[in-house]
Image (cartoon, grey):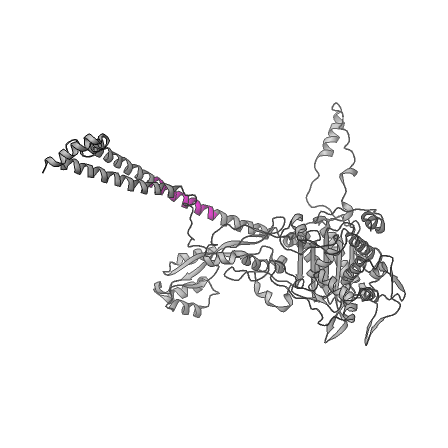
Amino acid sequence: MSGGPVKAEAQAAAVQPRRNLIDAWLYGRNIDRGAKSRARVGLIILAFVMIYGVIAGRLVMLANEPGAHNARRPSADAVSTARPEVLDRRGDMLAADIKAPSLFGEPRNIIDVDEAVELLTAELPDLDAAELRDRLSSRKGFVWLKREITPPQQDAIHRLGLPGIGFLVENKRVYPNGPEVSHLIGHVNIDNKGIAGIEKWVDGQGLAALHMAGLATDRQLKPIELSLDLRVQHALRDELIRAKEKFQAIAAAGLVTDVNTGEVVAMVSLPDYDPNDPRQALEANRINRLTTGVYEMGSTFKALTLAMALDSGKFSLNSTVDARQPLQFGRFVIHDYHAQNRRLTLPEVFTYSSNIGTAHLALALGVDYHRRFLKKMGQLDRLHTELPESAEPLVPQHWGEINTATIAFGHGLSVAPLQAMMGVGAVVNGGLLIPPTFLKRTPAEAAALAKRVIKPETSAEMRYLMRLNVEKGTATRANVTGYYIGGKTGTSEKVVNGRYDKHKVLNSFTAILPADKPHYLLLVMLDEPKGLPETHGFDTSGWNAVPTGAAVISRIAPLLDIAPRFDLPPPDKLILARDGG
Amino acid sequence: MYRLLNLGVIAGLVLAAAYVYDIKYQSTLRAERVAKLRQDLRRERDAIASLRAEWARLSEPRRIQALSERHLSLAPVRATQFDDFDSLPQRPMPAAPDDPIAATVERAADAPDSTGSVNSPATGERQ
C-alpha cells in the first residue's frame, strides 16, 4: 500500500512541476507523518499570527481614536448642577457659580445618634435638633443635613470625627450685584435650577436636559452675555429710587433700549428684590412692571397715533384738526388737559398733548386702519422675549369708534411698557420694528429681524415732533444742556372701581437720545406720584417723570458715549432738512 | 528552522512584555499626573470663580457710589465739562536748554499735581 502514493506523487510531479514544488515545501520530498505534522504546526502558527495580528491592529485603531482618552465620568463632587456665568455687555459679572460644601449623613453608619445631634447643633446653631434627630434615626442610606455651609464650619465638623457624616461640594449661585439687576436676571432654587428671568431662559436652552443627564456637573459652560450695561443700570436705578422717595410713588420703573438693535441696556422695576434671597420675589408688589404688568400708556401712545396719521399720507405737519370743543360719545366726553379751544396744527396737537386732536386724527383714518396699524406695530399681541414672564395686552373685545378715539391717546388699551417702547423705537429709528432682546445683538442680526412699519420720512417728522415737545411742549424740563433730547410725556389716570381717578395717576416720560439721530430710548414710569410744594401740587408727568428722566440722561449719556453738543440749529433745520421730510 | 523561530518568538515575547510593562508603568504615572493636574485645574478654576465673584461684589456700582459719596468730593460729570481735542491749546515751546531758571520753572510746571483729597471750592475745608 505504501508504494501507491509515492507512485502517484511521482506521476503528479511529472505532470505538474509547480504543484510538486508546493508539496515538497509543505511536506518535504519524502512524505511522512513528521513532515505532515510540522506542516500543520506551521498552519496553526499562521492562523494564530493572523488572529493576534487582527487583535493588535484593532488595539492600534482604538488607541488612535481621537477623544478616547478624554471620556470623562461625572465626578462624585458637585452634585448640584453647574450653570454658565452671566455677564453684562462689558464683561462685568452678574451671576456666577461658586463651590460650597453641603453636609449629609448616612444614618445606617451612625453609631451614636444623640452624640451626633449634640455635636452638630453645637457647631451649626440654626439646625433644628428634633428634625436632625428624626433624619439621622431614619432607615435611609442618605439624608441632607444642611446645604451650603461655610468652609470654616466644614473644617470644624470634619474635626468632630463623626462617623456617617460627610460633605459634598455643590455649586451655589451668587449674584454679586444684589438687587441691582433683580428682575432681568431672575433667580434659581436650591438645586440651582432657574425659576425666573434669564436664569429660567438659560435652562430652556438645553441646560435642563444636560442637568437631567447629569452631564453639567463640572463642565466649562460658555458664559451668557447680556445686552445690559451694569453702569447704566445702576445710574437708572439710583435715580429712580430717589424719584420714588421724593414723589412718594408706590412704584417706579425705567428702561433704556438701543433703538437700532432692540437691545435692552437697562431695565429697572421698583420695588425689586435681591436674587440672593428669592423669597422676596413672591410679594405681589415686586413684579416686573415693564414686562409682566400691562398699563394704559396715556399720551405716550399719541406718538404712535401721530406716526400713523403722518404715514397714511392724508395728513402732513401743516394739517390742522378741530380741537375747538370736547369730543362727545354718548355720555362719554373727551377733554383736553391743556385746552386751546381752536384748530391745532399737528405739531401743536403733539406739544399741547391734545386728546381731542389725536382722537380726531385716528377717527379720520377709521377704526380698521387704526387697528391694523397697532397690530403691525406689535401692540395687540403678547410680546415674547427671553424673559419667560410676559403679559398679554388687554385689547377691547368690541373695538368701536369710541375705542379708537380713546386708544388714540392711550386709554382703553393696556400693553406692557416694553412693548410700547418697541413701537416708539420703530417710530423714531427710521421706521423699523425690531423685537427687543436681553442678549447681545449685532446690527447685522438686528437688520435681519427688522420689519419696516413706517416710512423713513415719517420717522424723521416724528423725531422733529419729539424734539419740539422738549423745546416748547410738555417736556421742557427735560431740556438737558448739551444733550439733544426729544421726548413725550404721558399722564394717565388709573382706573379705580371702574372709574378713572383724577388723583391716582401713572406718569411716564419717553425720551430719545439724541433726537436728530436716535441711538437710545429711555422710559421712566412713576406710579401714583404725589404733588409736592415745589411742583406747585401738580402730579402730571412734566413735573416728576420728566425731571427724573433728565437726571437719568445727564448721568447715563457719558456712559453711553454720547458726546455733548452745543449751539445746534433749530430742530426744523437739523432734523427735517437733512432727512428731506 | 523551528528552533530558530521559537527562539525568535520567545525573545520577541520577552521584549514585548518588558515594553508593555514599561508603557503601562509610564501611562499609570501619567494618568496620575493628569488626574492631579485636572484636580488642580478645578481647584484653581473654583478659586478664580470665587475671587471673580468677590471682585464683582466689591466693585459693584452701588458700593463704589456709597464709598465715593462718603470719602470723595467728586460729583458726576456735567455736559459742559467735556471738550474735544480740536479746542486744546498748543503745547508751549520747551525752554532753551542753556537757561537754568527757565528749566527749573519748566520742571516745576510739569511735576504732577497731588491727587489726594482736595479742598472743596465752596468752603475751603477738607472733605
Residues A556 and A318: in front is A318
Name the residue at the left extreme: A1
Q: Is residue B124 above or below residue B10?
A: below
Residue A149 seen by the camera: no
**Span colored in magenta:** B24-43
Residues A215 and A581: in front is A581
Dividing the image into 4 quarters, which one contains the N terminus of chain A? Answer: top left
Q: How many marks?
A: 0
Looking at the image, residue B60 sits to the left or right of residue B46; the answer is right
Q: Is residue A227 above or below residue B20?
A: below
Counting from the top left corner in percent of width and height, residue A84 is at 54, 53
User: For the stretch drawn in magenta, what is the main secondary structure?
Assistant: helix
Looking at the image, residue A18 sits to the left or right of residue A338; the answer is left
The answer to if B34 sits in the magenta stretch is yes
The answer to if A171 sits in the magenta stretch is no
Residue at the (87%, 57%) spot, across then down? A318
Counting from the top left corner in percent of width and height, residue A447 is at 68, 50
Residue at the (81%, 77%) spot, across then down? A331
Counting from the top left corner in percent of width and height, residue A182 is at 61, 59
Which image quadrant is residue A406 in?
Answer: bottom right
Residue A362 seen by the camera: yes
Which image quadrant is residue A543 in?
Answer: bottom right
Counting from the top left corner in percent of width and height, residue A576 is at 83, 50
